[in-house]
Amino acid sequence: MGAPQLSGGDWLAEDHRSPKRFWRGVDWWSAGVTTVGTFVVYLVTLAPSVTLENSGELVTAAHGFGVTHPPGCPAWTVMAALWIRFFPIGNVAWRVNLLSALFGALSAGLTALLVSRSSRVLAAKLISREESRQHRLPLHAGALGGMAAGWLLAFSPAMWSQAVIAGPYTMAVCFWMAVLVGVYRWSFEPENRGRLYTAAFLWGVGSATHPITALAVVALAVFVWLADRKLGRDLLVVLLAAIVAVLSSIIGLYVSFYLGISSGSAVVLTCTFFFVVTWIVQSLRGKRASR
């Protein structure tokens, strides 16, 4: 008698235990095509110089390591300042716009990577290993779905409009997608806490890029609890994990001190953090903070 046929979902557990097989070539192919295709379109439609909105202010802040309007975007300012110095092609405003396009393309690629892998998990729950070998379309369809998801994000009006001008939004989205990829990968091996701490660090940097990212901490906490119930039951482990995660986030948020250093005044730093806290509280209450 032959080996028993594994039902949908059972055979995928073997893949989960093999870290080398977690991300398949088809996942990277989907992410790569999505990233390159998105970047090409962004490059063709890129703004040639300073545009409307906060473009002039942001380009000036990046050029002089300055401070933007409250609540500030210190992580983006530092990144943009370094970028325009180490990428001496074109005018300063065009270089900053190109940085937005780069982060926008990476955001789309990370989205494709996540959707491609998670779609394969869904397909494995519906078909057996033998069926997956006979019919490759359901698994390859995940890669196509990843590309579709990535391009839906990339060419949505909000994302596309911000990916061709100066601004911190595409960078914030990129860090957020990196956090999602990180916690998703960690959820298959919860005992490897390093991935969780790395995701916490990226969340901190993303929050220093734009404070809207800080609101995601509630969703992340729920996801961690759902992914590892044992972690939720062991109070000592929870305490240790929470301390390390908070410290990792603080390291990422530490870049916010750049505002006070650059302005030469502790008042700017204090007002910035006060504005961020107020903005978050008002957002949670359904109100919009005034500029």
Image (tube, rainbow, N blue to C red):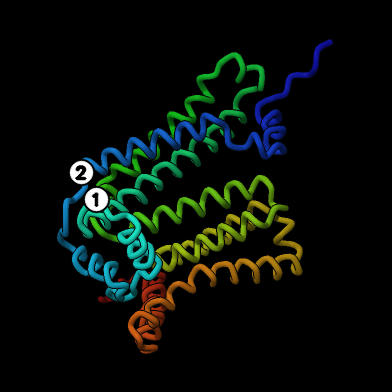
Q: Which residue is mark 1?
A: 164
Separation of disc 1 and disc 2 at Cα?
7 Å
Residue sitting at 21 percent across and 47 percent down? 46
Label 2 crowding class (10 Å Cα cut-off): few <14, some 14-19, many 20+? some
Residue plotted at (23% across, 60% down): 92
Residue 264 left/right relative to 199: left
Residue at which label 2 appears:
45
The C terminus sits in image quarter: bottom left
Q: Find residue 261 and report its image quarter.
A: bottom left
Please tell me which residue lies in front, 6 or 26: 26
Q: Is residue 62 left or right of residue 142?
A: left
The image shows residue 64, relative to residue 271, as above or below, that is above
Q: Contact, CB < 8 Å: mark 1 with mark 2? A: yes
Q: Residue 181's x, y, as percent?
A: 53, 48
Percent across and percent down for residue 56 are 18, 66
Residue type marked 1 = Val
Image location of residue 268, percent across then percent down: 35, 85
Please say if 74 is above or below 229: below
Amino acid bearing label 2:
Thr
Disc 2, SS: loop
Q: Is residue 158 visible?
A: no
